[in-house]
Image (spheres, grey):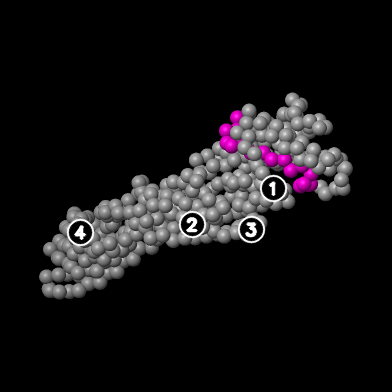
Amino acid sequence: MRWFAPFFLIFSLFLTTSAFAQVSADELGFSVHGTAQLPKDHPWLGFKPSRAFSAVHFACKRSDGQDVNFSVAGLRPGAEKRLPLPVVKGVFHYTCKLSGQAGKEKFANFDVEFDTRVGEPPKIQIAPTDVDENGRKITVRLTEPAGRLELDVMGDDGKPIANVSKKFAGEAPGTPLTVTWTQKADEVVGQFQLRAYDQADYWSGIESVTFVDIPHQDVIFESGKWDIRPTEEPKLAEPLERIQQQLKAVAGVLQIELYIGGYTDTVGQAGDNLELSRKRAHAIATWFSAHGIKTPIQSQGFGETALKVPTADGVDEARNRRASYVLSVQPPPASRGFPARNWVRVK
C-alpha cells in the first residue's frame, strides 16, 4: 500500500543586505517527493529552474533533532535535477534555511518546510500459539517500527463480531504487539483479518479461519455397525480435499485441529446409540488419518442427545444419523449441536 500524503512548503524571503537578491520558488522549480516505499522508491528534492543556479544549499533541522545539510549545484534552465534525501524510515518534518547563488546574485534565508514518509510494508511474524481465542487476543511481531493493528473478527456464520484498532508508539521490530476483542458467550469465531501498519502507514495483512464446518455427504452405516464400507468411501474423499485445502491455507499461522462428531436417531436404547455414535465418529476420524490428514484429530459421539430433526423415541429418521466435521483452533464450544466436550484424541 502506498500513501500519497501532501507535503508542505513555506517560502519567505528576508533581504538582509543589498548583496542578496530575491529569488522566487517558481524560478527554482522546487518540489518534494517525500512519500516513498522502500526498497524500490526513495525520497528526493526536485528542481526544474527557469534560470541557471550555480549552487543551492539547505541547512535543515529534522523533527528527530538531527541536523541535515545538503547541496545541489549546476542547475540549468528547464533541466530537471533530483537531490536524494536521507533514507530514514518513518515520518519526519524538515525545517530548513535555503540559500545559494544564481549567476552573480546570492540569495539566502528562504524558510522551507516539508515532510517525508518513508518505509516498507512490515512483515508479520505470528505463531499458532499467538492466536488465543479463549483469551480473545492475538499477538504479532513486525519487522518495522509499529504503527497500529487493525483486527476484524467474524463469526462462524460470517457475521461481524468485533472491529478493533490499536495504536502503537513505534515499538522496535520484534516487539510483541497484542490486540484484544470482546464477544458474546454464544458467539463462535470463524475467521479473522489482521492488518499491521508501520510508522509510515505502510501495511501488510493476514487472513485466517479459526472455525470451519466442512460440508459433506453423510456415510451410511449398516445397522448396529461402524465399519466404513468401500462403497461409502467416495463420500469421504470430497471433504478430505476440502480439509486439506483449509489446513494449507492456515499453515504457519494457526494450529488447527479436526473434530469429528457422531449422531444417531432414536431407534434403540439411548446408551447403545451413544456408544454406536462414538465408534462411528472414531471410524471416520481414523479414515481421515489414514488418508493423509496430519493435523491432530479428535472424535466424540453424541448419540441421540443432539437430534438435527426432533422426533419421538423409536423414530427412524435418516437425517439424525449423521456426522459433523469441524476444523477449529479449540474444541467446539458446547452448544445444541455439541452438547458435551468429551473429545477423544484419535492421533
Marks 2 and 1 sit apart, C-alpha to C-alpha, by 31 Å
Marks 4 and 2 sit apart, C-alpha to C-alpha, by 41 Å
**Label 2 packing within 10 angstroms: few (<14), some (14-19), many (20+):** some
**Label 3 packing within 10 angstroms: few (<14), some (14-19), many (20+):** few
Q: Are marks 3 and 4 in contact (CB under 8 Å)?
A: no
For discs 3 and 4, the disc positioned in front in the rendered view: 3
Residue at which label 1 appears? 340
Mark nearer the N terminus (1 vs 3): 3
Res. 241 in view = no
Residue at which label 2 appears? 179
For discs 1 and 3, the disc positioned in front in the rendered view: 1
Marks 3 and 2 sit apart, C-alpha to C-alpha, by 19 Å
Mark nearer the N terminus (3 vs 4): 4
Q: Are marks 1 and 3 in contact (CB under 8 Å)?
A: no
Q: Three-letter amino acid code at disc 3? A: Ala
Q: Three-letter amino acid code at disc 1? A: Ala
Relative to residue 115, is residue 268 depicted above or below? above
Image quarter in which the C terminus is found: top right
Q: Three-letter amino acid code at disc 4? A: Asn
Q: Are marks 4 and 1 in contact (CB under 8 Å)?
A: no
* Residue that appears at 53% across and 51% down: 132
Q: Nearer the viewer, residue 328 or 276?
A: 276
